[in-house]
Image: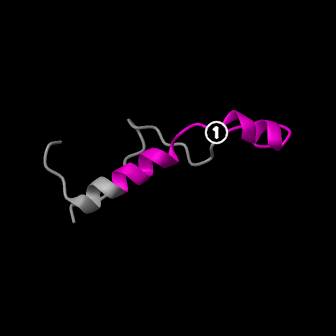
Amino acid sequence: MGVKSLNKKMKLAKESRKIRRLPAFVMIRTKRKVLFNKRRRDWRTDKLRISED
């Protein structure tokens, strides 16, 4: 995992921001209609198809 291109690093960073849990204030603000992050991805099973650019 040592040497990565900048493009790949940026894409991985973006994906890691996407899989965070939903903030608690969102659940409160939506009166618990939104309970979880739909875009949540499991690191072991759902693989990213990011090419080495």
Magenta segment: 11-36
Q: How many marks?
A: 1
Left or right: 22 as drawn, with respect to 28: left
In the depicted structure, whether residue 48 falls above or below residue 37: below
Relative image position of residue 52 (x, y in whole percent): 21, 61
Residue carrying label 1: 22
Relative image position of residue 34 (x, y in whole percent): 76, 43
Relative image position of residue 24 (x, y in whole percent): 70, 33
In magenta stretch: residue 8: no
Quarter of image, res 33 = top right
In the depicted structure, whether residue 2 falls above or below residue 48: above
Q: How is colour applied across the structure in the image? A: one colour
Extreme residue in the bottom direction: 53
Relative image position of residue 1 (x, y in whole percent): 18, 42
Identify the image quadrant of the C terminus. bottom left
Is residue 49 visible in this depiction of the protein? no
Left or right: 52 as drawn, with respect to 13: left
Is residue 53 visible in this depiction of the protein? yes
10 Å neighbourhood of mark 1: few (<14), some, or many (≥20)? some
Extreme residue in the right direction: 31
Q: Amino acid at mark 1?
A: Leu
Q: Nearer the viewer, residue 43 or 7?
A: 7
Left or right: 52 as drawn, with respect to 28: left
In the image, what residue occupies the spot 54% across and 43% down? 40
Extreme residue in the left direction: 3
In magenta stretch: residue 26: yes
In the image, what residue occupies the spot 46% across and 38% down? 42
In the image, what residue occupies the spot 43% across and 50% down? 15
Quarter of image, res 10 = bottom left
Is label 1 in a helix, a strand or a loop?
loop
